[in-house]
Image (cartoon, coloured by chain):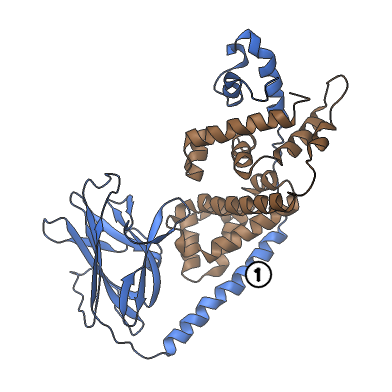
Amino acid sequence: MSEAFHPLVKQLLDGEITLAELPPELRTEGAAALRLLAAVDRTPVSLPTTLDRRVMAEVRRRGAAPLLRRAWRRLVEPREIEVRLRIRPWVAWAGALAAAAVVALLVTRLPTLQRDGRSVHVATRDSVYVRFVLYAPGAQRVAVAGTFNQWDRDAAPLMPAGTSGVWTTTLALPIGQHQYAFVVDGERWVADPAAPGVSDGFGRRNSLVAVMAQGAHTL
Amino acid sequence: MGDVGEVTDATVVRAVLAGDVERYGVLVRRYRDRYARYAARMLGSLDAAEDAVQDAFIRAFDQLAQCRDPDKFSGWLFLILRNRCFAERRRERRASRSLEPRDDAVASVDRPDGAVEQADWTGALERALGQLTPEQRDVFVLKHVEGLAYDEIARMTGASVASLKMRMHRAYDRLRELLKEHV
């Protein structure tokens, strides 16, 4: 006897056809296969509430570590900042933007931010201005979201540079490594395909930028 | 539990990222049991499921800044738990590779008249599921224990419906082989 179910019986197990729709010669096999599914244990499972306490105890312990690091950072001296510009071609994004895109990061020593009443971050001794540029012709609005603004897709909009399709903004980012992605038209997430990134857990990638006292660069 | 249903995941995630670590407890209470059955069926043990869920919550906290869509925290947490279950299953398979096949345990539920009781069937099926690959067991549990459709599983896992069906159909054949005395 074959070890494999007939393809129609597999469709039956998948719920795509009923037993009555099987050819008569397959109904015995189909009925036996359905007995297999009838044996599936779907009893709900509850875990003890002690799990909550164990998780939270560990979370509190781990949550304390970044505070120590931040405190240490506040003790260090102001940093020299240098200018770096890096442009990456935006390629082959499955036609989603119907155009190429470019992301650039600019770090400047003494920037003055003017945003027409818009609230902007102010660089401190622990932060560096980073300019984000995206070439996205046809986009109605563009923003950059990342770990520096809790992935808030409305927190950091980019401004169009004329009608060239170039969108830019400048943000003061804390020293450290940040993940980011652009949000086009409020819903389309765009990462930098030319830069190694990290998975966000949903099969997409976040781009990485390292902000240092000496400047910033994508990773 | 009263406050648990009133705050969105995104609000809680942003509060935690802003430093309010205690708010993470809302997510733990909210999702402690959501995927417990999946973990238990994947790992074949409540104790192992509890460990896996605990680890997943802690790992999710460590990586919370990478959660791009805080509104989808539950799906993101599930993927972390799923990866944890896969790793545990692979570790178990490596550890048991030198052991004798466990088909005898499955065959032991056979009855001379073929009338296997439902409880015996469930036990036999559970043991047979333990011999599937992690990928096969994953899709079987999501579809036939959690009751999800292929397209829902595809959205959760990022796999295509076609590849999910292929895994499932191979799982059907493997289960038939393991339970051939009964099917």
Type of residue at label 1? Ala
Q: Residue at x 68, y 65 (%)?
A: A54
Q: Is residue B125 left or right of residue A66?
A: right
- The N terminus of chain A sits in image quarter: top right
* Quarter assignment of residue A190: bottom left
Q: Secondary structure at mark 1?
A: helix
Badge count: 1
- Residue at 25% across / 47% down in the picture? A97
Q: Residue at x 61, y 25 (%)?
A: A13
B137, above or below B63, in the image: above
- Location of residue A106 with respect to B105 vertically, above or below: below
Q: Quadrant of the C terminus of chain A?
A: bottom left
Q: Colour of chain B?
A: brown
Q: Residue furthest top?
A: A24
Q: Residue at x 72, y 61 (%)?
A: A50
Counting from the top left corner in percent of width and height, residue B137 is at: 64, 40
Q: Position of residue B60 (x, y in %)?
A: 55, 60
Give the blue chain's letter. A
Residue B142's spot in the image, x, y percent?
60, 39
Which residue in the structure is indicated by mark 1?
Answer: A57
